[in-house]
Image (spheres, rainbow, N blue to C red):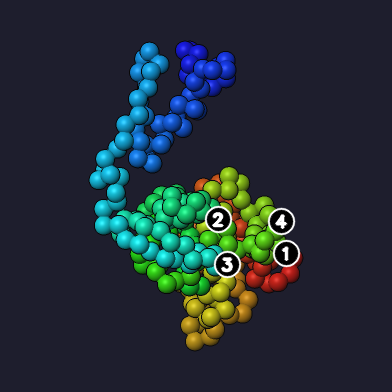
Amino acid sequence: MNEKFNETGPSGNRSRREFLKKVSIAGAGVLALQFADGTEIFAEVPEYVLAPVDAVPLKINVNGVERAVSIDARTSLLDTLREHLDLTGSKKGCDHGQCGACTVIIDGKRQLGCLTLAVMCDGKKITTIEGLAAGEKLHPMQQAFLDHDGFQCGYCTPGQICSAVAMLDEAKRGDASQVTQNLSLTVAGKLSDDEIRERMSGNLCRCGAYPNILEAIKEVHGGAKV
């Protein structure tokens, strides 16, 4: 392999990582090119290429902090959180609203970040996985997931936890689910395993940690160790 592109090459030679970092500044308005002889050129990218189409200024409250962004009106909330606000806890799984990995809490209700336009969130309060903990103190649901090993690869975990937190609030409000036996009775009491499974069915875990996720949610719901 050419030493100039070896990540552990001698001092003074370009590493692959360094080269990629320079190329990445294209997103900041500069295009970097390197030729075979090692020479490189930098050229400004025209502003009209970088400017988002239909850019709109937006202020959204995320985890108790008002954040200002200027984005394409078609940008999803998920991409806004990850690409513009550096809140990468919310994961992009299917990007089609089918896996639940991007679940966040908006005004107390769980929503899919990939199917929600950021411009729809103006004036709303958004809570992501980063906003659940109080400083170093984890949210009870986060702690329960740790205690019950409710994750394996961890990719779906942020969405699972946000969904579980909002789901229990939904139950407290008396919202019914597909398996609620008696719609005339509130379901704010103790949720059965089937109720929890049904209410969490929109969040998929490809590792199959469902039994542990169920135990973690039951512990928080019951307020006692399972």
The mark found on residue 226 in the picture is: 1
Q: Is mark 3 on a helix, strand or loop?
A: helix
Mark 3: give few (<14), some (14-19) or many (20+) Cα within 10 Å. Answer: many
Q: Earlier in the sequence, mark 1 or mark 3?
A: 3
Q: Which residue lies furthest to the right in this view?
A: 225
Where is 15 relative to 211, above or below? above
Where is 95 relative to 179, above or below? above
Q: Are marks 3 and 4 in contact (CB under 8 Å)?
A: no
Q: What element carries label 4?
A: helix
Which residue is under mark 2?
A: 158
Can you see residue 101?
no
Q: Which of 222 and 95 is in front in this view?
A: 95
- Identity, as a three-letter code, of the amino acid under mark 4: Asp
Task: Specify the quadrant of the image occupied by residue 10.
Answer: top right
Q: Is mark 1 on a helix, strand or loop?
A: loop
- Identity, as a three-letter code, of the amino acid under mark 1: Val
Q: Which of 43 and 10 is in front in this view?
A: 43
Nearer the camera: disc 1 or disc 4: 4
Which residue is under mark 3?
A: 165
